[in-house]
Image (tube, rainbow, N blue to C red):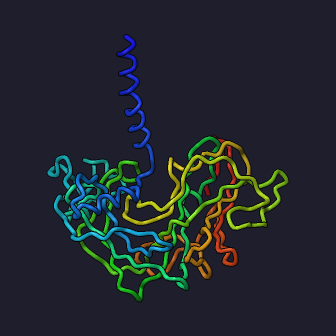
Amino acid sequence: MQKFFVLSVFLFIPLIAILFVQCNEPVIEPTDQDMVLSLNKGEGEVPVGNNFSFPAYLADGYSIPAITATNFGTAFTYDDPSTVDVEDCSFYEFKEVDCEYVASDEWYAQKVDGNVWQADYVLLTPGQNVSFIDWGDNIESVNPKIDRPFRLEVTLYKNVASENLNGYTMTVLANPSSPDEIQGTNGDKYHGIWATVASPKGKIAVQKWSDDNTVPENWDGTKWTDAVAPDLSFGFAVELNVGGKLIFGASKGGWVPTVLGKYRLTFYLAEGSDIDLQGAGVGNYGGNVEDVTPSESLNVPVVDAIRNITYVDVTVAEAGSGGKK
């Protein structure tokens, strides 16, 4: 009986771990990306996860192994393609998927063995400024709730209209807005106007305002000295999201606030970074267009060019309270 119990526990723990991972945001870890890009280097069995599709600037030593060959070997198919109704999308519960668009071409999903592609990227050199900063939509539009995970995400964009950087056309193929979301490409390239900026020096500080509600004013390079930092259990680093874009995001589902009140979320660069936020605006990415949609939401981020930081103030509310714009 004792041996059976030990064996049961041994099998049960990995199962819990798998279930936990499946509840995370639809993000491909950069380590998976790096490993899959070794596909053509003969380094043994390679986990599937490649879909780097959006042009990028790499700063402060951040690197991506270059692929030796692009390959579209496994076309995306539905369980029963003959039953897909592009008029009402009733077969696969497409919801936000553009069924007619998907049905009009052959697509290749990411995280599928045999499909390897890579958008263009270049190194960021000192003196090149970020064009605009896009904080996560949930941060701008909804206040955090007590004891509930709150996704922390920041994306830096640089205008590359004058440069020859190409990305891959991507679309949602199935399970939109879920941890199981599937995106893919039809192999078409486009000349991008925007590239994201990736760096290992991107950091985030989560701090609570003082009890007297005094606005934090003194920044020492890593935190506001007149605010309190709660214990945080997540990491914050560059991620490859499901759309193939390099962004900054929090691991483990994000921040889980345990105390009500006002907080300041501050994105900053560690000492020695080549990334310059001077002149950068705050906006929402709106596709491959020159115009950037300004941020007009519940929580409006601020760029402090002198300190080379950007921050946004939010209020942690009770789980059952309002908070949307």
The residue at the point 65 percent across, 65 percent down is 311
157 displayed left or right of 173 = right
The residue sitting at the bottom extreme is: 162
The residue at the point 51 percent across, 48 percent down is 253
The image quadrant where one finds the C terminus is bottom right
The residue sitting at the front extreme is: 43
Of 59 and 249, the residue lying toward us:
59
Question: Where residue 247 sits: x, y (%)?
Answer: 47, 64
The image quarter in which residue 68 lies: bottom left
Of 8 and 98, the residue lying toward us:
8
207 displayed left or right of 134 = right
Q: Is residue 172 above or below residue 57?
A: above
The image quarter in which residue 308 lies: bottom right
The image quadrant where one finds the N terminus is top left
Of 322 and 225, the residue lying toward us:
225
The residue at the point 55 percent across, 56 percent down is 152
Question: Where residue 249 sits: x, y (%)?
Answer: 51, 58
The answer to whether any part of residue 100 appears in the image is no
The residue sitting at the left extreme is: 82
66 displayed left or right of 234 = left
Question: Where residue 40 sits: x, y (%)?
Answer: 22, 64
Question: Where residue 164 sits: x, y (%)?
Answer: 35, 85
The answer to whether any part of residue 276 appears in the image is yes
